[in-house]
């Protein structure tokens, strides 16, 4: 049964000992006792119950999560150094760091590493559940007690802009752990009643049915009622945070639930994009924009959560507490799914990739540019400038994919692009003393790649250059038939890859480079403009033209078929 | 009210979620009335998604290290 009361009992505090902030989190939620009860129920089921995983291991997992959020647990409890570092511990810690910090990148390989280190499936499930609980509690602390135990000067360690483009990621089919039949579970009727089905993320936890039971109760307590926020507001919060976390699974779940609740798919798609339907009330838009800041550490945070901004839109304290609780619950559920590899319950309308973690921050990108984030390459560049030739290797490894894709998009040939990539790095090395840090190193490097690609193109095809193509001012969209809801599903991946390659290569070069830098290499507007030596308005104009031309090329393949197609006229 | 041509010249920032409140309001007022521009916005968003998610110009993961090795070998060889 859920614990009554709205203060942290000694048992709850002891179960999450590294998190001294828990008592203050509960105190800050006094206006909404059911939220406190729900959180206590999860602490009891996951942290307090002695299962396969030891207390010492769970404490280490909690610390790893706190570290991803910038919380300094050492002030509260010193790390346990009484035990020798065993192989088990280091494997567990590596898994925790990855799931806590870069959840989307966890694959079956990480789970297999734990199995090789001697953890059985039940212990691994408990590991994932413990990390998910840690994410939930750290989300609450971040929103409700923002200054607690945060390391001085530390901000949440969001993924750097180049992270998503450079990371290696192998998609592996889930689920990662053995599963058991769910139909005999006492929670089966509850899920059937609430959702009409049993989501895989719960079915995949049946090695700990007691935890699933606690999760079902928590959902019933905080999600189903409409006494504070409406169900649609709560589902939109779940959708917005899941999108910021790049969770294909939960974006599919909550998009589907919103459809059932009567909302058009287009509205949900806009929320997923970090944009908002014109019909959505301004207060709800403010709520989603603000709450999105509470996504997991891997998402690029568009700023610090500010409850005052919500009060200004008329939200009451209890509504804000419920919104924060929903955000924390979303991070809990998303982490469970990432760690377990639960497969989607519905065909996803949108499949996320690691690079979406950066793109999800698109609306804040301008702010991100204005603040001139520190360039992570600068220390390495300085070492090279001071004569450490070998340090250059790091820069090649970090940026070779981005340089290659820029050149492949200009030159068309993979072999030429590979050779040219080497030339670009040799030129960059020879000229590194000229890099003065006025732009990011990656921007400077891309401008070297653009110049190298342009020169090669000029040598090969003197008639074609990046600048000398006539501007077809008369361009006007011709294809005005509506596209399929899920155009990606109309073609196999390899067909789509070829189609996009051909369409991009058909673009006049000056539009092509804008698309390559912004949409394929994910540079910001400022970075792309700097790399191309253009003003920002000029870059934006080229990008828009390039995108519209691509749309024309792709349209015949993705137009909605049959009677549902709509053919409109421009006025 | 904007014409379609004016809308199509201005909606780039809207696609990137970077339109200011005034521009956004003007564009959305047009969108409410114009099915053709709704279709163009929707299909351009889908275009961006398809292009961004495609691996059309991606260097395969196993080709990164050979490039690193070759570049560093050439730098050392040239004694740059």
Image (cartoon, coloured by chain):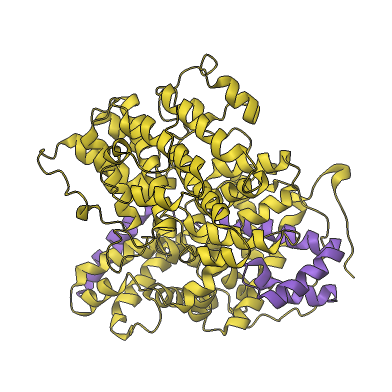
Chain colours: A yellow, B purple
Q: Nearer the viewer, residue A432 or A328?
A: A328
Closer to us: A289 or A5: A5
Query: Which part of the image, by quadrant, shows the N terminus of chain A?
Result: top left
Q: Name the residue located 35 percent from the left edge and 63 percent from the top edge.
A: A147
Q: Left of A525 or right of it: where is A139?
A: left
On the question of residue A271 being in view, the answer is yes
Residue at 65% across, 44% down? A231
Q: Residue furthest front?
A: A5
* Residue A79 appears left or right of A171: left
Residue B36 coordinates in the image, percent (x, y): 84, 62
Q: How far from the left and from the top, in percent, is residue A19?
A: 29, 48
The x, y position of residue A469, in whole percent, is 66, 80
Residue lying farthest top?
A: A184
Viewer-nearest residue: B49 or A129: A129
Quadrant in the rendering for residue A189: top right
A160 vs A42: above or below: below
> Which x, y percent locates residue A538?
62, 82
Q: Relative to A212, does residue A513 appear above or below in the rendering?
A: below
In terms of depth relative to the viewer, which is nearer, B2 or A397?
B2
| In the image, residue B30 above or below residue A488 | below
Q: How many marks?
A: 0
Q: Is residue B54 visible?
A: no
Dividing the picture into quadrants, the one containing residue A332 is top left
Quarter placement of the C terminus of chain A: bottom right
């Amino acid at each position: 049964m859920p614990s009554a009361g709205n203060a942290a009992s000694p048992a709850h505090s002891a179960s999450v000992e590294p998190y001294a902030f828990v008592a203050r989190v509960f105190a800050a939620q006094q206006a909404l006792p059911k939220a406190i009860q729900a959180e206590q129920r999860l602490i009891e089921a996951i942290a307090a119950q002695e299962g396969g995983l030891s207390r010492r291991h769970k404490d280490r997992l909690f610390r790893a999560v706190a570290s991803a959020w910038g919380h300094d647990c050492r002030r509260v409890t010193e790390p346990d150094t009484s035990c020798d570092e065993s192989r088990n511990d280091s494997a567990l810690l590596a898994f925790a760091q990855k799931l806590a910090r870069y959840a989307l990148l966890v694959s079956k390989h990480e789970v297999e590493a734990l199995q090789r280190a001697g953890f059985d499936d039940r212990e691994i499930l408990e590991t994932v559940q413990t990390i998910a609980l840690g994410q939930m509690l750290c989300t609450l602390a971040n929103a409700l007690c923002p200054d607690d135990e945060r390391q001085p000067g530390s901000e949440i360690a969001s993924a750097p802009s180049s992270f998503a483009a450079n990371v290696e990621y192998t998609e592996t089919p889930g689920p990662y752990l053995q599963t058991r039949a769910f139909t005999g579970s006492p929670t089966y009727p509850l899920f059937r009643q609430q959702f009409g089905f049993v989501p895989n993320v719960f079915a995949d936890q049946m090695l700990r049915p007691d935890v699933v039971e606690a999760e079902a109760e928590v959902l019933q307590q905080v999600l189903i009622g409409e006494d504070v926020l409406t169900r649609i507001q709560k589902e939109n919060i779940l959708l917005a945070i899941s999108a910021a976390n790049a969770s294909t699974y939960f974006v599919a779940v909550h998009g589907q639930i919103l459809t059932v609740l009567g909302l058009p798919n287009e509205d949900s798609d806009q929320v997923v994009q970090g944009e908002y339907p014109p019909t959505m009330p301004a207060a709800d838009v403010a709520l989603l924009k603000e709450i999105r800041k509470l996504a997991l550490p891997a998402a690029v945070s568009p700023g610090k959560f500010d409850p005052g901004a919500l009060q200004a839109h008329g939200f009451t304290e209890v509504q804000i507490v419920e919104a924060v609780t929903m955000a924390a619950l979303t991070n809990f559920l998303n982490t469970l799914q990432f760690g377990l590899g639960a497969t989607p319950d519905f065909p996803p309308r949108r499949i996320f990739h690691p690079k979406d973690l950066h793109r999800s921050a698109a609306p804040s990108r301008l702010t991100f540019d204005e603040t001139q984030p520190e360039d992570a390459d600068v220390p390495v560049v300085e070492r090279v400038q001071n004569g450490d030739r070998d340090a250059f290797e790091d820069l090649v490894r970090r940026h070779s994919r981005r340089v290659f894709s820029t050149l492949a998009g200009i030159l068309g040939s993979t072999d030429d692009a590979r050779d040219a990539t080497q030339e670009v790095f040799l030129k960059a090395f020879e000229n590194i003393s000229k890099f003065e840090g006025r732009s990011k190193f990656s921007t400077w490097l891309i401008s070297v790649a653009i110049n190298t690609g342009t020169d090669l193109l000029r040598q090969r095809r003197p008639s074609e250059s990046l600048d000398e193509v006539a501007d077809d001012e008369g361009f006007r969209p011709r294809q005005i038939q509506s596209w399929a809801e899920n155009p990606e599903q109309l073609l196999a991946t390899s067909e789509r890859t070829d189609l996009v390659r051909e369409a991009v290569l058909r673009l006049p070069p000056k539009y092509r480079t804008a698309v390559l830098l912004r949409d394929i290499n994910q540079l910001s507007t400022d970075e792309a403009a700097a790399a191309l030596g253009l003003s920002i308005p000029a870059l934006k104009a080229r990008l828009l033209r390039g995108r519209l031309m691509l749309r024309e090329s792709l349209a015949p393949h993705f137009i909605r078929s049959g009677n549902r197609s709509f053919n409109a006229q421009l006025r | 009210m904007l014409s379609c041509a004016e809308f199509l010249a201005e909606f780039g920032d809207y696609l990137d979620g970077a339109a200011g409140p005034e521009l956004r309001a003007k564009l959305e007022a047009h969108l409410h009335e114009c099915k053709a521009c709704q279709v163009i916005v929707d299909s351009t968003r889908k275009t961006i998604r398809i292009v961004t998610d495609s691996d059309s110009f991606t260097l395969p993961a196993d080709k990164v290290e050979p490039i690193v090795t070759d570049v560093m070998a050439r730098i050392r060889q040239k004694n740059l």
